[in-house]
């Protein structure tokens, strides 16, 4: 009999190893480093006149040339006027799309009749690129300004409505049964189950919708705009001012990134009650 034999079994049992925590990289330093590296590669490829077969970087403006052109642009009122005009258009169109898209998504997810009627029309129109509707909007609406807002709203409407519809359909039926067994009617189910439970899908659709809205707004501004970031970018291209073209492109990219980030942040705040794993 050894010394170990005299010990209780519990003493010989090894303690369970604690689960290893994943190392979480800090977000912003990594993002900044990635952007800085991309700018460095851009500068190197353009200044060294690199040509890789059919891809040529010697015809593009360098990062420094674009930065200098950007510094010139921000000192003019024209840049800020274009920026404000695009933000007004995207804000108006996206607000309309959010209101109509959420309402339509809830109706499609809850009503068989709405799915068979209105849902059929949505599925027929949804594959059509929103920018292809520009001629129709010009004929329907009294001004190009109203047409650009309508194009923006149309582009954002479909991803929002579809995302909300799927979120509503995925809700567990036991939640609704619980409310109804307590005497709640359709309105109580809507406010206590459908809307709170579909919030993740709502913000997912809003995030996708705002990106699509920016794409179509810029395209509409290039076609029929008089002011706006898209209009100014296309005008710079026709004037062969390529650094200004890149200024417009980067401005659009930053605006899209910021609006998506705001929506994601709002979604995290509103749905903070949801369980989340380590990121």
Image (spheres, rainbow, N blue to C red):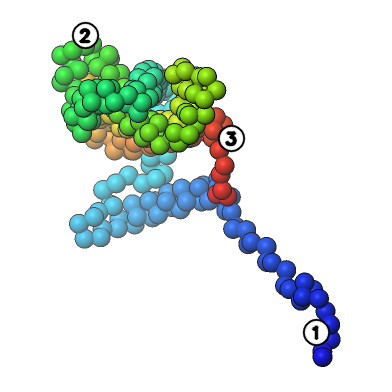
Tell which of 79 and 152 is nearer to you.
152
Question: From this viewpoint, is residue 133 visible?
Answer: yes
* Residue 212 on image: x %, y %: 32, 32
Spatial separation of the CA atoms under disc 1 and disc 3: 51 Å
Element under label 1?
loop
Say whether disc 3 or disc 2 marks the residue closer to the N-terminus.
2
For label 1, the crowd category at 10 Å Cα-Cα, with few meaning under 14, some 14 to 19 and many 20 or more, is few
Query: Is mark 2 in CB contact (under 8 Å) with mark 1?
Result: no
Q: Nearer the viewer, mark 1 or mark 3?
A: 1
Q: Residue furthest top?
A: 142
Q: Quadrant of the N terminus?
A: bottom right
Say whether disc 1 or disc 3 marks the residue closer to the N-terminus.
1
Q: Is residue 276 left or right of residue 136?
A: right
The count of marks equals 3
Identify residue for label 1: 5
Identify residue for label 2: 142
* Residue 200 on image: x %, y %: 46, 34
Q: Nearer the viewer, mark 3 or mark 2?
A: 3
Spatial separation of the CA atoms under disc 3 and disc 2: 46 Å
Identify residue for label 3: 273
Question: From this viewpoint, is residue 259 visible?
Answer: no
């Amino acid at each position: 009999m050894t010394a170990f034999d005299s010990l209780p079994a519990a003493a010989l049992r090894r303690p369970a190893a604690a689960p290893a925590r994943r190392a979480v990289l800090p977000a912003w330093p990594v993002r900044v480093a990635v952007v800085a590296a991309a700018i460095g590669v851009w500068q190197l490829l353009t200044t060294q006149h690199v040509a890789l077969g059919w891809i040529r970087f010697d015809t593009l403006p360098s990062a420094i040339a674009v930065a200098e052109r950007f510094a010139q642009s921000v000192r003019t009122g024209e840049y800020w006027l274009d920026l404000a005009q695009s933000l007004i258009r995207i804000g108006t169109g996206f607000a309309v799309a959010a209101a109509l898209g959420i309402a339509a998504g809830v109706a499609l997810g809850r009503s068989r009749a709405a799915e068979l009627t209105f849902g059929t029309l949505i599925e027929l129109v949804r594959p059509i690129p929103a920018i292809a509707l520009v001629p129709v909007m010009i004929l329907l609406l009294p001004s190009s300004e109203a047409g650009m807002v309508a194009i923006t709203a149309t582009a954002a409407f479909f991803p929002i409505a579809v995302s909300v519809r799927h979120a509503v359909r995925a809700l567990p039926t036991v939640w609704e049964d619980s409310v109804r067994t307590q005497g709640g009617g359709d309105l109580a189910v809507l406010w206590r189950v459908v809307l709170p439970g579909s919030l993740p899908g709502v913000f997912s659709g809003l995030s996708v919708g705002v990106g699509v809205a920016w794409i179509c707004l810029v395209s509409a501004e290039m076609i029929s705009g008089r002011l706006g970031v898209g209009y100014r970018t296309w005008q710079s291209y026709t004037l062969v001012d390529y650094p200004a073209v890149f200024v417009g492109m980067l401005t659009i990219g930053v605006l899209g990134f910021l609006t998506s980030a705001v929506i994601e942040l709002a979604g995290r705040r509103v749905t903070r009650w949801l369980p989340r794993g380590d990121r």
